[in-house]
Amino acid sequence: MKYIYKFYNINENTLDSLKNSYLYFAKPSQLNDPFDCKIRYYIKGTDEEKRDYIRSTKLKPTNNKYYEYIKYLNNPKLLDDKFNKNNIEKANDTISVLSLTENPHNTLMWSHYAENHSGICIKIELNNYNDLYGIKFKGHNFNGRHTNLVPPGFIFIKKINYSETMPVQNNILNRNIEDMAKYLYTKHENWKYEQEWRAVIYDKFSNSKQKITYNPRKLCGIIFGDKTKIDNIDLIKNVFKEKNCQIDYYKAIPSTVEYKMDIIDL
């Protein structure tokens, strides 16, 4: 896979993102699926198991939560309140999500995410490091903490798993990160048509930014919808003319032989 795609309505936010070369990472609370990224975990165990969990966090006296955790060490049952529904929802919004698709031909995607075929779909070049697909963003978006497997600024994307059932609810005491991550990359089968790939960033690594800038050369094409107005086509072309960026333009038109949109050169 060499390219990935994202659909947009044409509005001020879209124009701003194109002018300033950024992709917007949404908070889970901003997503259109009420089940999306809702990590379902709970805490169940003996007082000593709860103390072991608290100790495993290795908090230091300089950490502003250290004395809070001392309180939990003295009374582990207080952790039951910490992992209640409200606190879990707050924790869920410490991440941000970029939703992409592998398929620019999908009629429903043009209808739902590109203002009934009057918007655009952008074409982004992917990087591949150690068999991980992802997008190379500018390094200054992040605070320097990253894995040695990939260069700074590289954010991998993962294909969404579509399922009739939710991932297994996770006991926080098990500290199974993979089980918790499944909630970030699993959606109900109703959403399967989206053919989504997703990037997830954590606030602590991105300094809570949601507008993450990329190298303008990574944006290699704009696909206009079948109903995109000429004025809007000219408006977007002028954005790249002012940036002195070379970019390919396409148009999505209904296929004459299949239920899909054909992509033709403009």
Image (cartoon, rainbow, N blue to C red):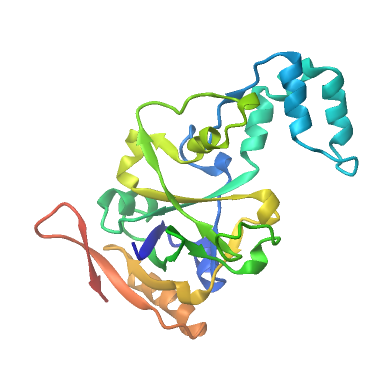
Which residue is rendered at x = 33% and y = 67% of the image? 224
Q: Is residue 180 above or below residue 140?
A: above
Which residue is rendered at x = 57% and y = 32% of the image? 176
In the picture, measured across the screen, residue 172 lies left or right of residue 150, that is right
**Quadrant for the C terminus in the image:** bottom left
**What residue occupies the far left of the structure in this picture?**
257
In the picture, measured across the screen, residue 223 lies left or right of residue 182, that is left
Q: Can residue 261 be seen in this view?
A: yes
Query: Percent position (x, y) of residue 19?
Result: 54, 73
In the picture, measured across the screen, residue 38 lies left or right of residue 79, that is left
**Quadrant for the N terminus in the image:** bottom left
Q: Is residue 208 visible?
A: no
The number of discs equals 0
Image quarter of residue 222: bottom left
Q: Is residue 27 above or below residue 210?
A: above
Image quarter of residue 83: top right
Query: Percent position (x, y) of residue 163?
Result: 36, 32
